[in-house]
Image: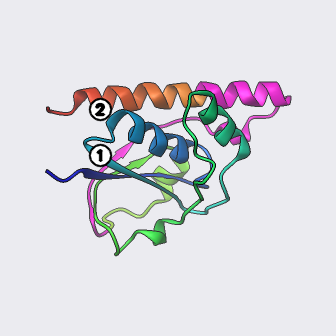
Amino acid sequence: MSKARVLFLCTGNSARSQMAEALLCKYGGEIFEPYSAGLEPKGVNPLTIRVMDEVGIDISNQTSKSLDTYLGKLSFQYLVTVCDDADQNCPTGLPGIDERMHWSFEDPARFKGTEEEKLAKFREVRDLIEQKVKQWVAEQPS
C-alpha cells in the first residue's frame, strides 16, 4: 500500500507548516508522506528549528519551498492549510489535490516579546500542532 501524500501549506513555510511536516513524519510516517510549502517562502525560522530540536526532531536541513515546487509535479491526497492567510489565499481546485483541510494555528513568528517569550510562543504552537497531528493520525482507519 502506498502512503498518502500530505502537503502542509502556510504563508512563509517558516514555522507552522515545517512543524506539521516533521510531526506527521514522526507520528504518521508509516501511513503518510508529508511535505510542506509556502505561498511566499521566507526561510525556516531559527526558533522553529530550536523548538523542534527540543522534542528530538532535527529539521536543521529543511528548507522553505514554494507551492509551485510541487504543483503539477506531485499529487496529494491531502492539502492542509495551517494558517488563515494560506486558507484564504490559496487557490481552490488545484490540480493533483484530492482533499483540502484547514487547521488554524497562530503565527508564532509574529509574536512580539523577549527571546524567551518568543520561544514560549513557538513551543505553544508546536505543542498544539503536535496534538492535532496525533489526533488526525489516530482517526485514520487501520
Q: Secondary structure at mark 1?
A: strand
Q: Secondary structure at mark 2?
A: helix
- Is there a contact, CB below 8 Å, between mark 2 and mark 1? yes
Q: Please identify the residue farthest to the bottom as the structure is shown.
A: 72
- Looking at the image, which residue is at 26% across and 26% down? 138
Identified by mark 2, the residue type is Val
Left or right, 124 with respect to 77, comes to right
Identify residue for label 1. Answer: 32
- Residue 82: where, in percent of width, then height? 48, 43
Left or right, 138 with respect to 142, comes to right
Query: Which quarter of the picture shows residue 29?
Result: top left
- Looking at the image, which residue is at 47% across and 70% down? 69
Distance CA(mark 2)–CA(mark 1): 9 Å
Answer above or below: position of 8 versus 39: above
Q: Which mark is residue 137?
A: 2
Residue stretch rendered in magenta on the structure: 95-124
Left or right, 20 with respect to 30, comes to right
- Residue 63: where, in percent of width, then height? 59, 58
